[in-house]
Structure formats: structure tokens, C-alpha cells
Image: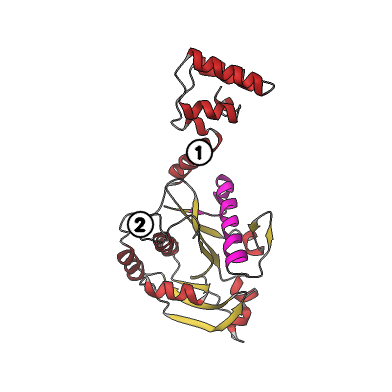
Amino acid sequence: MIIVVDGLNRHLFSEVLDDMFELRARVFGGRLGWDVNIQDGKEIDEFDHLDPAYVIGLDDGGNVVAAVRALQTTGPHMLADVFSAILDGEAPIRSATMWESTRFCVDTQRLNRGKDKNSVSYATCELMIGSLEYAKNSGIQDIITVIDPIMDRVLKRSNCAPYDYVGKTAPMGKVSALAALLDCTEERISGIREFAGIHQDVFLEEEEALELFKAKKSAEINPANRDHKPLTELEKYFVEQMSAARNEAERQDVLKLIEALTDTFTTEQKTALLQTPRAFAHEA
């Protein structure tokens, strides 16, 4: 599933962006060894302050598993101001109908190596489709992207081969980097869809995304109530008693009371109450 976060809606998805910046830190600072700025576990640079658009891939649980950044080339951008060695003396391309695509990354730790929906391959292709369709629908004709040779091979293997390159391949951290050109055409998008077997709409509506993140956050805060049913009055009483317990002995007494008076709680819920006394408190 794909969502687009930009200057207009980023206030709604601040936590999603944090997850994305953390993924970027693991990929570009850790795995690739690029010289990037990482603070508090997040990789953020000066171009993230220019209101770019982020195309973000999510799994069914609402976790960020892939992301790419889109930025206009008419102003500051990475190829012109950071990766200028790639240009090898050439002037940077600047066009209102060309965007720069950078920071393409996929969570290889969370995703598997197969070809199902939870695979690196699927997430990669879905992100390509999402970013190209978003650009095309925004009136963009071409994308210039800074990639490494491995990603270049991925593009070619996925029916998304660059139609040209700019400058030369230059050293960048543990790997090399090059600038590739992609046209935002229906033919290119269809080729990726055919390769990956992705024929449905990849985009998630903003309201659907917010509901997904709300459910994800609720599950994280309240693991003992994953079905999200309202608490009964008796359950609320137990919550209050557990929250008021001052030590382990008092918590054990409350748990014994729960065991004696009701079978409302599952074993998992009772364990959660003992381990995290305030697990239900926000619903009381």
C-alpha cells in the first residue's frame, strides 16, 4: 500500500515520517555506509526541509517498509548540490517537468526474500509504480534518480530500465552512485505491473491510512485488547485496581480477584495486566 506525504498533509503523518527517516538511517548510514547526517536514529538532510513529496510503502500492519523522496529540479536538489561529482563537469538538469527521485529504500529486515506481498521484490515494485504514477498524475514527464549499480540492475530486471544516464559513476560510501533517467509513461508503469503481478490500485486513501495508523497505535499501546472492544464496567474496575496497585503483592491480589470473579479476560489479557498495569487505562 502506498501513501504520499507532502507539505500539505505531513502534519497528519509525522510518526510515519519518523519511521521513514529511521529506515533511511539503517539503509544509507548502515547498510550502504554513505556519509549521511544521522541524529536520534533518523537520517534527515537539508532537502527534507524543502517540502518534498514522499512516496511511502506500507505493509498490512501500517509499518513503513519502503520509501522514496521526490523533489523539483528547478531549485536545490541532490544531484546538483551533493552528488555533483556524478555530473563530471556537466551542468545539472533543471526542468519544471523533471523531478529528482532520491533516498529510495526498502526494509530488507522486515520483508522476506520471496515474491509474495511481504517480500522485498513486491515492495520495491509497488514503490516504483506508486512513485511513477504519482509523478505522471502531477504532470511530471521524467525522473532523474541517483542510484547504486545494484538498484540499476533491479530497475532493468523489473521492466523499468533507465532510458539514459547522466554524467559518470562515482564512488559513494561503500558503493558507487550514478544518475539514471526514467520517463513517467504508462508503458513503463505497465511493464513493472506485469513483471510484479500488481494490477490493483496501489494507493491508500488518506482516511484509510489514518484509520490504519490509529489501529496500529492502539494495538501497540493496548496489546491485551487487540479486538478493540469497549471495556465493561467490571473490566474498568479491574483496570482501576491494577493501576492503583503499589507493589507486586497488591498486583497479585488484583489478579487473584480477576481469576476468582470472572472469565472475561483471556490468559493473554491477564498476563498483560500483570506486566503492564496501565495497559487498558486509556479506555477506562
The answer, for residue 244, to whether it is visible in the render is no
Q: Which residue is mark 2?
A: 116
Q: Is residue 146 left or right of residue 34?
A: left
On screen, residue 211 above or below 182: above
Which kind of residue does numbered mark 2 sit on?
Asp
17 within the magenta span? yes
Instruction: Between residue 30 and residue 123, name the one nearer to us.
Output: 30
Query: Residue 58, how many percent across, how many down?
Result: 46, 52
Instruction: Between residue 125 and residue 95, name the one nearer to us.
Output: 125
Instruction: Between residue 28 and residue 186, name the one nearer to us.
Output: 28
Query: Residue 47, how many percent across, how many down?
Result: 63, 64
Disc marking residue 83: none
Residue visible at 41% across and 61% down?
113
Quadrant of residue 127 within the rendered picture:
bottom left
Residue visible at 58% across and 79% down?
92
Quadrant of residue 115 within the rendered picture:
bottom left
224 within the magenta span? no
Query: Residue 83, how many percent across, how many down?
Result: 62, 76
Residue at mark 1 to residue at mark 2: CA–CA distance:
26 Å
- Residues shaded magenta: 4-31
Check disc 1 and report its element: helix, strand or loop: helix
Q: Is residue 151 left or right of residue 193?
A: right
Q: State which tag comes first along the sequence, 1 or 2.
A: 2
* Extreme residue in the bottom direction: 89
Q: Which residue is mark 1?
A: 214
Specify the color scheme: secondary structure
Instruction: Between residue 131 and residue 228, name the one nearer to us.
Output: 228
Circle 1 Cα neighbour tier, 10 Å, few/some/many (<14 / 14–19 / ≥20) = few
Residue visible at 35% across and 57% down?
116
The answer, for residue 184, to whether it is visible in the render is yes
Residue visible at 56% across and 35% down?
221
